[in-house]
Amino acid sequence: MDVEEVIGEVLAKIRPSEEERAFVEGLMKELEETAMETIESLGLDVKPYFVGSLAKDTYLAGDHDVDLFLAFPLDVPLERLREEGLKLGEAIGERLDTYEIAYAEHPYVRARYRGVKVDLVPCYDVRDWRDVKTAVDRSILHTKWVNENLNGRNDDVRLFKRFLKGIKAYGSEIYVRGFSGYLAEILVIKYGSFLDVVEKADFILRQKVVDPENWLKKEPELAMKTVKRETGEGKPLVVIDPVDPRRNVSANLGWEKYGRFYFKSMAFLKGPSLEFFFPQEKPVRSYLSELKKRRTVLVTLVFDVPDMVDDLLFPQLEKSARGFEKALSREGFNVLGWNVGKSEKAFIMLELDRSERERVKLKPGPEFFTKRGRDFYEKNTKVWLIGKRLYSEKRVKESVVEVILELLENNQVALGKGIREAVKGADILLNYVPKELEKEAYLFLSREKWNLKD
């Protein structure tokens, strides 16, 4: 199949049908009417705005999540916005099918209506970036900017989003570090089409700074501050938000996910295929067979998931895994890789070169004629000289499980603050995982989880 044939087949699958569009339009109309009636009944000065992919007509077939923002006047104090915004969200939620309170920068309501997820989010009714007071306020400006600049390229955005989902590079959550939907829209608007963006994967990376609204000329001081801050942090891209020169839209985009986009784009152009958009499930083999083949060791810590959102949990899991990597390296083990995640419980997987170390550990000391040398001599039972330096030895625990327990007991592992106690009470499994983690263990050990050439 050539590129156009592939694109045609993909669009047939991801472009909403007329029937689906009618459902979405009807749904949004009903929600708007419900919101307006509730606002009036409470006597509030609030405007409802639809934001996100439904409001921009960049949603994929079958993906109908609704973002309904409840915009308060700018002169309303933040605490009052939070209080009245939650009260309003709950009042609307009571008229829908189900609802619950969720928490981000401030509380909001997550509801369901006619089988569709509906987020009811209080915000400020901003006109430009100078009005922005909370992180969610920009969403109104984002929707307006995309609708004014997309110029009929909605299907190109759909293609790009589906491509990113297919290659596992979509999602700006901190535990994903991929492309957001808004970033996908900006790149299509900036470079012309889905194919243009894919063809320019290398150019975009080398260009480094993408500035669709020319903020570097209109607000040079603020825009340069953003560029310097973000490039200083080693980000793959700096995409200056078209609606706010102070923000990098790609701030959460990691090198690994941009790298996937980079290589998969080249592969797609070389051999176009539906597989890039709709990948087949990888065959899962035995993780025990993989261990036997690799002649390595798998250590898995399993513990109860603390009550926190994934955006907070995953960075702490990653910090803890890196902490184990450093601590075990100091103890003589070579950590070949790590993996973290959450199923029924949270887990940290570590692949090591061996399960046991030498029983005796050499202790190099200082030069013998120094004060530290005399202290070393007094503290150790066996001491000898090699040249002018003192040496001793100590007996150490051999098993990696014993070593980990000792490290945790002595607080010698840098753990995520919010999960420290949970990790300390973890079950430590050697070359074994619970049934629900067998697939995850295989994908980790085989590196199929991250393989760029699948």
Image (cartoon, helix red, strand yellow):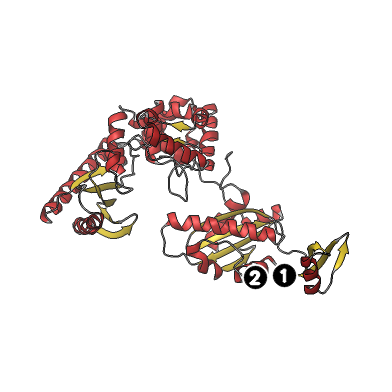
Label 2 near label 1: C-beta < 8 Å? yes
Mark 2, other Cα within 10 Å: few <14 / some 14–19 / many ≥20: some
Place residue 413 in its image quadrant.
bottom right
Q: Which mark is residue 406?
A: 2
Relative to 209, residue 328 above or below: below
Residue 285 visible to the viewer: no
Left or right of 292: which side holds 320?
left
Mark 1, other Cα within 10 Å: few <14 / some 14–19 / many ≥20: some
- Residue 93 in the image: x percent, y percent? 22, 57
Quadrant position of the C terminus in the picture? top right
Q: Residue at x 60, y 48 (%)?
A: 447
Place residue 430 in its image quadrant.
bottom right
Relative to 247, residue 334 above or below: below
Q: Residue at x 79, y 62 (%)?
A: 364
Q: Residue at x 41, y 41 (%)?
A: 180
Left or right of 381: which side holds 434?
left
Task: Determine which residue is flagged by label 1.
Answer: 397
